[in-house]
Amino acid sequence: MRTIAAAVALLLVASSPVFAQAPGDRPAPVLSPEATPDRMVTFRLRAPDAERVTVVIAEIFRQVPGYDESWYTGRFSDDEVPLEKGPNGVWSLTVGPLVPDIYDYVYMVDGVRTLDPVNLDIKPGDAALENWLTVRGAEPLYSDQKPVPHGAVTTVDYESRSLSLVRHFNVYTPPGYETSGERYPVLYLLHGAGNSYATWVSAGAHHIMDNLVAEGSATPMIVVMPNGHVAAGANEVPADTPAGAFGADLLTDVMPRVEARFRTIEDREGRAIVGLSMGAGQTAALGFARLDLFSHIGLMSGAGLDREGHLRSYMPDARTANDKLRLFWIGRGEGENADGARAHSQVLTDNGIEHALHISQFGHSWITWRRDLYYEVGPKLFQ
């Protein structure tokens, strides 16, 4: 999937007048991004006719010297850092040292979102593509493909009867699944608004799960990554359906197919639902409405209180929540309204609802959600 996306992206940028070069007069491709051993990163883009080029990535922006932290705190949108134009129409920016991890970024060329044409590591999305940037330190990353037993990722194509649409989801099965004959607990892992069913795999979720299992830090589990978006033309669903059309599809189409095809533990004790941002809202709406199906709920960078500062209407009473849930986890980055998450946690505590709150050091970005999966949620599920 990543290879196809990269090929399409290169065709698009090659045809753009910003990057076109006269035949016989093609300069050598620039190196971008260039990450050096001291974790400094240089972005480069050849755009000789452009008047302004920026790189869009909140987490890198926050590490630029002189950056005003208040400019980002509480914002859910990305920020832009300008590049400087140099010889031969090559724009560049050097930042760092950056924290070792994988970041997503995209260029803006005179206001137009543009992939890095020489970086073939593409992050799939629902409405737009972006690039991945890997910054390494002295040790391997927690999401690297390490020399440990590996699971497998399967893409399932299906016709959603509830929506009358052809749709897709990814399924990760843990190491040894093919030969064990055992049944496994299942995690439904939801993406955010700008993502697709393929983004969690592109972000390395399968490697994260392999590494957790190999370290003995997590229970081997099946991970289902469904499509959180519903295309125009779908069947309408009843107005009171938890999480709307997506919820109808997950409950009546995705889950039955998963349990018919894969060896899952088919009871609530063996099911978890976790989502990020938009997916956190879907997780909360579905998870709390169907505590007969799910015993673990995780909210990454989303959900919370209503506008009056009260628990949302789908929240059960304390006795029900505490009796039914083996895990209720809430995570938020320090750079994305962490005070709101703390307020949510306090209201939950005041209402007697048991939960875990984790505030990480980053913002509303994949560096937060990947780390949440590895360091927080993955090890806590099905324990």
Image (spheres, rainbow, N blue to C red):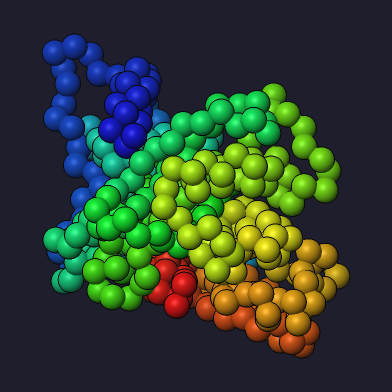
Quarter of the image for residue 291 reads bottom right
Which residue is the extreme one toward the right? 308
Quarter location, residue 345: bottom right
The outermost residue toward the front is: 181
Residue nearest the viewer, comparing 253 with 54: 253
**In percent of the image, x 28 and y 75: which residue is there?**
216
**Would you say residue 349 is visible in this rendering?**
yes
Relative image position of residue 323 (x, y in whole percent): 68, 80
Q: Is residue 197 visible?
A: no
In the rendered image, the quadrant that contains the N terminus is: top left
Q: Answer above or below: position of 215 versus 233.
A: below
Q: Is residue 304 above or below residue 54?
A: below
Is 245 positioned to the left or the right of 128 in the image? right
Quadrant assignment for the C terminus = bottom left
Q: Position of residue 237 (x, y in %)?
A: 77, 37
> What residue is at 23 percent from the left and 14 percent from the top?
22
Q: How many marks?
A: 0
- The percent position of residue 164, horizontal first and vertical second, equals 65, 26
In percent of width and height, residue 143 lies at 29, 61
Q: Residue at x 35, y 25 (%)?
A: 8
Judge by depth and name the residue closer to the eye, 98 or 170: 170
The image quarter containing residue 250 is top right
Front position in the image: 298 or 219 = 219
Compared to residue 292, the image places residue 55 above or below, namely above
> From the viewer's perspective, is residue 134 above or below residue 362?
above
355 displayed left or right of 25:
right
